[in-house]
Image: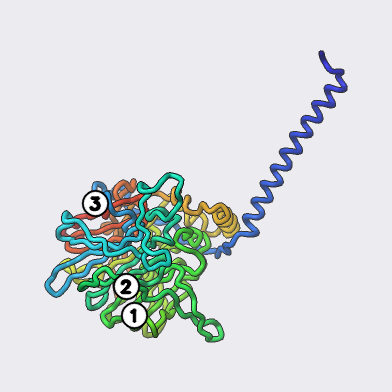
Amino acid sequence: RRLHPEVESSSTMAMMLGKTTIFSIIFAIFLGVLRNCYLQSPLRPVAVEMPPLPTTPANESRLVGTPKIFENDWPGAEHVTFHCDKKNKCTGYSGLADGRVVAFNPDAPEDGYETLNRTGCVSKWGCPRLTREELPADVDVPVCGELKWEDVCGRPLGLTVSEDGGTLLVADAYFGILAVTLLGEERGELSVVASHYLEKDSTNFQTRKILKLPNSIQVVKTGALYFTHTTDNWERRTILLDLLETSPGGKVMKMDNWRNKLEETPRVIWNSLVFANGLLVDQDEKFALVAETAMARIKRLDMATSKVSVAVENVPCTIDNLAWEVQKDGVSRDQKGVWLGCAVRRVKPFALIDFLASSTGFRRFLGGALYFTGTSHFMYKLVPKTGMAIKMEAEDDARTLVLKDANIYIDPKGAHVPGMAQAVPFKGKLYMGSHKAEYKGLAVYSLKSGE
């Protein structure tokens, strides 16, 4: 039975009005969410100007097919360092995404490796060693290797061996500067060197602050310890927000005597760096080099004059860690060359970091959306997986770093070394790790004569 035309028309109009009202409410809520993401965003992005995108050799693919060691056992081996004793016995060390600090023989990796400790063992939770396979599906407890438990299990980043070879110093993203004993019956024992630092404010008053994100670390022959501190604002799990913010909050810190843990606290010697990452310090402490990841450049600090200069800019990648070249013996450092581990390739026709550089409003909104939804780590999925290492020639005490196409090493699809964190030469081989926890193993490329 049909309704009267006037009644049917009124019913249709009511339905349309109802749909319009619902759509308007949804749209208003959507606009409110967008507005809130912007206004309530914790980010205060700084506008930066990036130079025109560079190019790299299109046919460069030397890293394709690079073999790996410990392929099934080492998740996210971000940093590797080597040390040889007086008997020329050499050992390699690395820190893994599940908090473990490991040692291996680079001359015989087939002999396996030794787990020295887990950095999370210094925490109030004790030593978390559970794996997901050991747990019921409904139990949510610390599982090392999963991103959300990094602050419990630890995340070792930079490593360096002390001048006497007896201690491995570790920059952990959550627990500060740690020391692992390497000699004697106490081998593997873990202790805290520093968890706070001192910084002077505008009135010259010293403030004690927590080490939020120590990163790259180095000891020089005098025993002085240097390390980068990437940011005061974000932890490693949300570090991509620092890349979006590009605020000059990075620092380099120093401890003249790191063994005197009770009386000495790290102090800031260089600040106003944008995403301070890889660090190299001259053994005579004349200068230091720091990679500013967000700016695709390396800065140089003259220790005597405190003068800061740019050693190289417009690098074709976002730089992670730095390493000195080695001499012909394959072991001794050669400060005439610097190796760069490249987290993301930055070349024509498009690079996300350059695209967002001048858009402070959009970065503020995007950062707010990622922060409030807790999804900043998903941005890693948007990052190309290309693996890339670069060797630069250092001129005039590294005042200038020179890049030549022949010194660029690429894994185009990132099948072997995605998200490269560091490239370290040692005894004719190039050891390359990744910051990605899902990447397992340590890639080892055999350098050819002249490379």
Task: Count residues near mark 3 (Cα–Cα under 10 Å), then give few for <14, some for 14-19, many for 20+.
Answer: some
**Residue 432 visible in the picture:** yes
Please name whichever residue, 183 or 369, is drawn nearer the observer in this view of the structure: 183
Question: Is there a contact, CB below 8 Å, between mark 3 and mark 1?
Answer: no
Eye-nearest disc, 2 or 3? 2
Type of the residue with mark 1: Trp
Which mark is drawn over residue 258?
Answer: 1
Eye-nearest disc, 2 or 1? 2
| Residue 89 spot, x, y in % from top left | 14, 68
> Does 135 sit above or below residue 42?
above
| Residue 392 spot, x, y in % from top left | 29, 65
- Residue drawn at point x = 30 percent, y = 60 percent: 390
Which mark is drawn over residue 179?
Answer: 2
| Residue 308 spot, x, y in % from top left | 42, 77
Mark 2 or mark 1: whose residue is earlier in sequence: 2
Please name whichever residue, 147 or 274, is drawn nearer the observer in this view of the structure: 147
Mark 3 or mark 1: whose residue is earlier in sequence: 3
Among all residues in the image, which is located at the extreme top? Answer: 1
- Residue drawn at point x = 18 percent, y = 61 percent: 105
Q: CA distance from mark 3 to mark 1?
A: 35 Å
Quadrant in which the N terminus is drawn: top right
Which mark is drawn over residue 347?
Answer: none
Please name whichever residue, 12 or 307, is drawn nearer the observer in this view of the structure: 12
Q: Which residue is mark 3?
A: 68
